[in-house]
Image: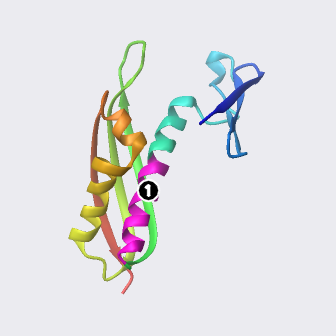
Amino acid sequence: MQVRVKWVDGMMFLGESESGHAVVMDGPPELGGNNMGVRPMEMLLLGMGGCTSIDVMQILQKGRNNVTDCVAEISAERADTIPKVFTKIHVHFVVTGKELKEATVERAIKLSAEKYCSASLMLQKAVEITHDFEIVDTE
């Protein structure tokens, strides 16, 4: 896999993926940025959230579960000193659907966290990652 990150101006960069997509990253004004894009550390959380969400949805859909929505709300704590690495990450899934079973959703999240999500598994080597979930029934 290859990506390219090109400086635009100030602290703004354009990230280009091998698959042909682009994203703008920018720093806050106090660091010379214009606040016109996602921060790189936010991008890291977004990538992990996307990775685990894809896993969870694939597992639930393969099990023919009637899922109508899936949201991963991710919160993270960072070290106070440089390097300001993540020290804790928490993923809260809100899964909406009809007649979803708690054990089924829990299993999908666990499989993602422990077996399938490359981003989570890589980050787990350096940071504590926890998960929980809620089910919203559309009956």
Does residue 39 appear to the left or right of 85 in the view shown? right
Chain part drawn in magenta:
49-63
Q: Is residue 110 magenta?
A: no
Image quarter hosting the N terminus: top right
Residue 127 found in image quarter: top left
Q: Residue at x 37, y 63 (%)?
A: 94
Q: Is residue 131 above or below residue 1?
A: below
Front residue of this view, candidates 76 and 29: 76
Residue at the left extreme?
A: 103
Asked whether residue 34 appears in the rendered view, the answer is no
Disc 1 element: helix
Asked whether residue 99 appears in the rendered view, the answer is yes
Front residue of this view, candidates 23 and 121: 121
- Residue 65: percent from the left, percent from the top? 37, 78
Residue bearing the label numbered 1: 53
Q: Residue at x 43, y 65 (%)?
A: 58
Q: Is residue 55 magenta?
A: yes
Q: Is residue 9 above or below residue 58?
A: above
- Residue 14: percent from the left, percent from the top? 72, 32
- Residue 108: percent from the left, percent from the top? 31, 62
